[in-house]
Image: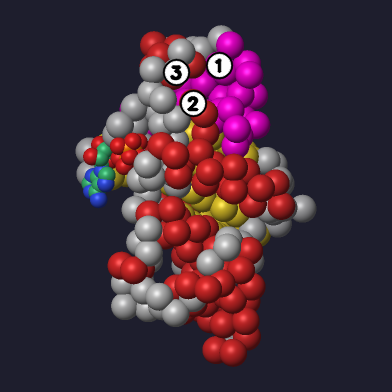
Amino acid sequence: MTALEAQVGARRGDFDIDVRVTVEPGQTLAVVGPNGAGKSTLLQALAGIVPLSDGRIRLGARSLADASTGMELPTADRRIGYVFQDYLLFPHLTLLDNVAFGPRARGATRGDARGIARDWLDRVGLADAQGRRPHEISGGQAQRVALARALASDPELLLLDEPLAALDAETRVAMRDELTDHLARFAGPTIVITHSRADVTQLASRLMVIEAGRVVQSAPVADALGTPASGFAERFAAGDFG
Ligand SMILES: Nc1ncnc2c1ncn2[C@@H]1O[C@H](COP(=O)(O)OP(=O)(O)OP(=O)(O)O)[C@@H](O)[C@H]1O
C-alpha cells in the first residue's frame, strides 16, 4: 500500500509555499483556499513540474524528490495521474490516443497501450467516441477522457485540479457521482483541489485549507467544516462558494 508523505517547499517568483501533506492509500484529501493560495503549485511540485526548494516527497517506499540532495524524479517516472484544471487533452490526437499516451510513455507497445485505453474509455462510457478528437466532444466528455487518461497509466497517486469546475451545474452533479465511483476503486492516495463544498463532502475524507502558501487547517472533513479555523474556512463551511 502506497501512502503519500511530503513536506513541500516551492517558489513561484516572489510567492512560496511550505506545506506538509500526508495522504493514506485509498484516501482522498480535498485542498481548498482562496485564489492564489498555492493549491496548484502544491500539485505541480508533487508532480515534478515545479522543483522543490525545500523538503521531500515520498510515495510508499519511493523517494520522488529531496531538496537536501537536489534529487527530482522526472514527472514521467513518478507514477502520478494528473487531471489539470482545463483538462489539457492533446488536440490533434483521437480520444483513444489521448488515453493511450500514458501507458505508451510507460513502455507499453502501441497495441497494448490502445487496448488499455479502449478499456478505460469503455469504463468512462466513451467507447463509441474513441476516434473523435477533443474539439468534437462536450466538456463532460472531456472531463471523462482526462480522468481515463490519468488512470490508464496505472498511477500510484492521483492529483485532480478542480476537475469539475469547468462543467455546467447539471453535468457537474452527474460527473461528481462518476468521480466518486472511480475514487472508491482507486487504491492509492488522491488529492483534489476544489472551490466546491459539495465536492469536499462527497469526494473527500480529509480537508486541508491553504492560505498564502501555508496550511491553516487539516482535519477530517466533518471536523474541519464543523470548526473552521479561519475566515475563509468559515465562509467555505457555510457554503458561500457553492
Ligand atoms: N508560472 C508562474 N510564475 C510565477 N508565478 C506564478 C506562476 N504560476 C502561479 N504563480 C503565482 O503563484 C501563486 C500561487 O498560484 P497557484 O496557481 O498555485 O494558486 P491556486 O491556489 O491554485 O489559485 P487558484 O485557486 O486561483 O487556481 C499566485 O500568486 C500566482 O500568481
Residue farthest to the left? 14
Q: Earlier in the sequence, mark 3 or mark 1?
A: 1
Residue 208 included in the magenta stretch of the image: yes
Contact between marks 2 and 1 (CB within 8 A): the answer is yes
Q: Residue at x 68, y 53 (%)?
A: 186
From what the image shows, is residue 74 above or below residue 53? below
Callout 1 secondary element: helix
- Asked whether 218 or 149 is in front, the reply is 149
Q: Label 3 sits on what residue type?
A: Gly
Residue type at the position of mark 1: Leu
Between marks 2 and 1, how big is the CA–CA gap? 9 Å
Q: Are marks 3 and 2 in contact (CB under 8 Å)?
A: yes
Q: Which residue is mark 2?
A: 197
In this rendering, position of residue 155 left or right of residue 242: right
- For the residue labelled by badge 2, is the local secondary structure a helix, a strand or a loop? helix
Q: Earlier in the sequence, mark 3 or mark 2?
A: 2
Residue 181 image position (x, y, % from top left): 66, 48
How far apart are the alpha carbons under marks 3 and 1? Answer: 10 Å
Question: Which residue is the site of mark 1?
Answer: 225
Q: Upstream in the sequence, badge 2 or badge 1? A: 2
Q: Measure how far apart labels 3 and 2 are at the Cα level.
A: 6 Å
Tell me the residue at 57%/53% (across/down). 158
What kind of residue is marked 2? Arg
Ligand 1 is found in the corner quadrant, namely: top left
* Residue bearing mark 3: 239
Q: What is the quadrant of residue 115 in the picture?
A: bottom right
Look at 30% across and 31% down and name the residue there: 35
Q: Which residues are magenta?
A: 200-226
